Image (spheres, rainbow, N blue to C red):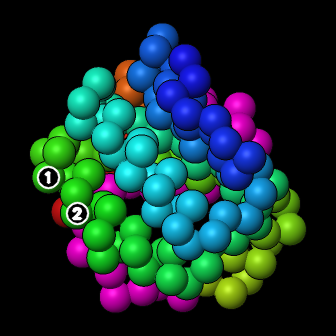
Amino acid sequence: MVVRSTIYSDIIFDSELEILQVIWKQKPTDSVFVDTYLHGLNFVQEVKPIQYYCTDLTQSGPLDREQEEWLNNFFYGKLHETLKAEVFVAVVFSDEHFKAIVTNYTATKLANLYDFLHFNYFTEKQEAYFWLESVKKGQDAILFPAFQYK
């Protein structure tokens, strides 16, 4: 089901898998970025509470620092207020973007602030969907670690 479609993005809800997907078609301005996420939040608040998300950045490239800050300082808190549940987010990058992130990764102060958020990163949308389906079925190591050290 297409929730919204613009020249910048598509928001699609897969009702069978209960995954809300944001596909960025091109790099958004800050106002378009915020408007898109608020539209998705409205869908979650008014239509269907959703715990599984897929964000596709393969065509748009990385988010700007201001966009990441807005997600951290505003959006994730609002999403948690709405759902009061764990949230799983699969982020799909281009190969080049993924390699740059792995090479230059540094944890932010906010990384541990939202313990209800679980991210995983991919270069293929099929892999992202497989992970989300696995989490939903309760088979992922993030929920049930194979080994626990005492």
The answer to whether 124 appears left or right of 65 in the picture is right
Q: Does the magenta stretch include residue 4?
A: no
Q: Does the magenta stretch include residue 113?
A: yes
Element type at marker 2? helix
Q: Please say if the residues under marks 1 and 2 sit with CB atoms less than 8 Å apart.
A: yes
The answer to whether 100 appears left or right of 43 in the picture is right
Q: Which mark is residue 81?
A: 1
The answer to whether 124 appears left or right of 69 in the picture is right
Which residue is located at x 22 percent, y 57 percent? 78
**93 or 44: nearer the viewer:** 44
Q: Where is residue 49 in the image (x, y as percent from the top left)?
A: 26, 30
Q: In the rendered image, which residue does mark 2 sit on?
A: 77
Residue 117 visible in the current orientation: yes
Going by the numbered disc 1, the residue's amino acid type is Glu
98 vs 42: above or below: below
Query: What is the number of callouts on the image?
Result: 2
Q: Quadrant of the C terminus?
A: bottom left
Element type at marker 1? helix
Q: Which mark is residue 20?
A: none
Which residue is located at x 32 percent, y 62 percent? 75
Q: Where is residue 70 in the image (x, y as percent from the top left)?
A: 40, 74
Going by the numbered disc 2, the residue's amino acid type is Gly
Q: What stretch is highlighted in magenta?
A: 106-130
The answer to whether 27 appears left or right of 88 in the picture is right
Q: Where is residue 99 in the image (x, y as percent from the top left)?
A: 79, 71
Which residue is located at x 66 percent, y 64 percent? 28
